[in-house]
Amino acid sequence: MPAALSFAIAAHQRGDWKEAERLYQEILTQDPSQADAAALLGVVLGTRGAFEEGLAWGKHAIELDPHSGILRFHYGTVLMAAQRLPEALETLQKAVLLQPTLPQISYNLANALRAADRWDDAIAAYREVLRLDPSFVPAHNNLALSLVRRKDYETALSHAQQAIALDPTYAEGWITLCNVAEKLKQYDRALEAGIHACTLAPESAYAWFGRGVALNRLDRDVEAITCYERSLMLRPQDADTLDNLAQSYQSLNRLEEAEALFRQTVVAAGQVILDEEGGEIDETAYGNREWHLALIELLRGKYTQGFARYRARVKAIPELRRPSYPFPLWKGESLQDKTILVCDEQGFGDTLMLARFLPVLKERGARLVFSVHPVLAPLFEGWQAVDQVVTHGTSVKTGDVFCSSFDLPHRLGVTLDTVPQQVPYLPLLPPDAATRLPAEGFKIGVVWGGSPLHKSDAKRSVPLSVFARLFEIRGALFYNLNRDLKHGDAEILPAYPVQNLLPLLTDFAQAARLIGQMDLVLTCDTATAHLAGALGKKVWILLPFAPDWRWLTDRADSPWYPTARLFRQPAPGDWGSVMTEVEEALRQEVAPYLSCGKPVLSAISRGP
């Protein structure tokens, strides 16, 4: 290699672009046939954004030596920088064919495939790099990131660990490890990796973001906010960071700040905030960032805007895409003498809550077909508000329009003051032989835990042991209505004076027969709360510090259920204070029953 070229490459490698460019130019002035200098000059020019000039020199280099894989590799690098991805892929593929044993060329090809969202091809290319050079640290790292996209988290974890083992000072590897560990729900490990990443790369927005996510998962929102704010200083207006920061504010009930940030997130994502007045907007016009904004608007009682914007869910959440039917989506037009198919959506509690709107459709002259989960169907069979109940998977080929149950509040123009409050609105089913309970005693149905599949179950569910102080209240008979027992519940439940009705809870109709015999239902935020409220039963609902949107904020009543009383955590995780309040209220509730002279049952059979 000529000495002049060696000096130019040395300047290039130390990042002295101006000096490298000057030296490459001098070489080419003296010898225009110097292909290496031409290709590397193209790379330097591309680095400083002079793409057209850089690509011209790259092409010149390939013309000088069309059989060189290295020259095509350099040209492909400039094409990638210029965001000319199809040409970059073609160029790098040819470079690999010409020089298949150079891992750096295969690595750049893998990066180009990854940029093109060709994840399987990228994974194969990274593995080829590691076959050629098992110690290629960035290839281990980027392979891990590609495997995350394929949800192969265990293999991704292995490669992230290998990258770090090969180079413990490689900050990108720690950032990736933080990301993968979080996906595996290894939150302590993710936080440790995030701390390492921030130490090694304190100016990396991604390091601070990953650390913030790990802190979020550990319910350390105050610390997470600090990390997200640091990340935004380094990468202003990043939509993901703004979104996570807003969610942290929401978790701390700093709702005004959260809503402002969610609005900022929409704008940062290049989207337009729609439906400020709840007007008619084509739902396909929504950006996927408006989903969280809708949720916080609903939490703050802004139902006109919130329910209109709630339609953003069909773009934001793949599982909530519109089903396909041979008739159109209902958009609020007259239903007189028309058949409408209403499909339930999301959780069982959502279906029960929104069923209140079906009688309204019936009053408008509609014939109504209601599609629900099979476990809900027995509850709605024979209900006057619907003409036909079908279960998921049933083919419905005839009708005039369809909609989701979650479309109804918007289409019916519901506001905070106009939520239909007439209860009961579901059928009152009398007990049958299997569900009939003794007539004596003040009966309290209890639910302490929801489905473990719910994303917020850890926050909304209450440890069974926390209920122990309530079970000692004289004059109250407790019945277990909890369908989803947590780990260890089956072992400790028989020790409490609680009649276990779990074997009878085969569907929601049977649950309704049991709830109908209760004097009070005491539950965390589960479908049982909605079922009891819809049946007009007195229900006390235990809420986490940052509750679901439907429970609003700073109130003990609910516009959805007039018989409900809300007990809220004063701080995250503080069920003890909630139970102190519930215990006092429950003793007052039972006291009149004790003073009326009726016999009190001091014990009931325990266990199944």
Image (cartoon, rainbow, N blue to C red):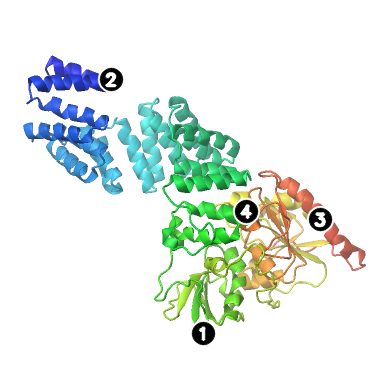
Please provide percent x and percent y for residue 544.
66, 50
- Is the C-beta separation of discs 1 and 2 under 8 Å? no
Please provide percent x and percent y for residue 376.
57, 71
Screen quadrant of the N terminus: top left
- Is the C-beta separation of discs 4 and 3 under 8 Å? no
Question: Residue 440 falls in which quadrant of the image?
Answer: bottom right
Q: What amino acid type should be assigned to the residue bearing mark 2?
A: Arg
N-terminal-most mark, 4 or 3: 4
Q: Secondary structure at mark 1?
A: loop
Q: What amino acid type should be assigned to the residue bearing mark 1?
A: Asp
**Quick one: 404 or 472, which is closer to the camera?**
404
N-terminal-most mark, 1 or 2: 2
According to the picture, the residue beneath numbered tag 3 turns out to be: 585
According to the picture, the residue beneath numbered tag 1 turns out to be: 337
According to the picture, the residue beneath numbered tag 2 turns out to be: 14
Question: Residue 509 falls in which quadrant of the image?
Answer: bottom right
**Disc 2 versus disc 3: distance between alpha carbons?**
72 Å
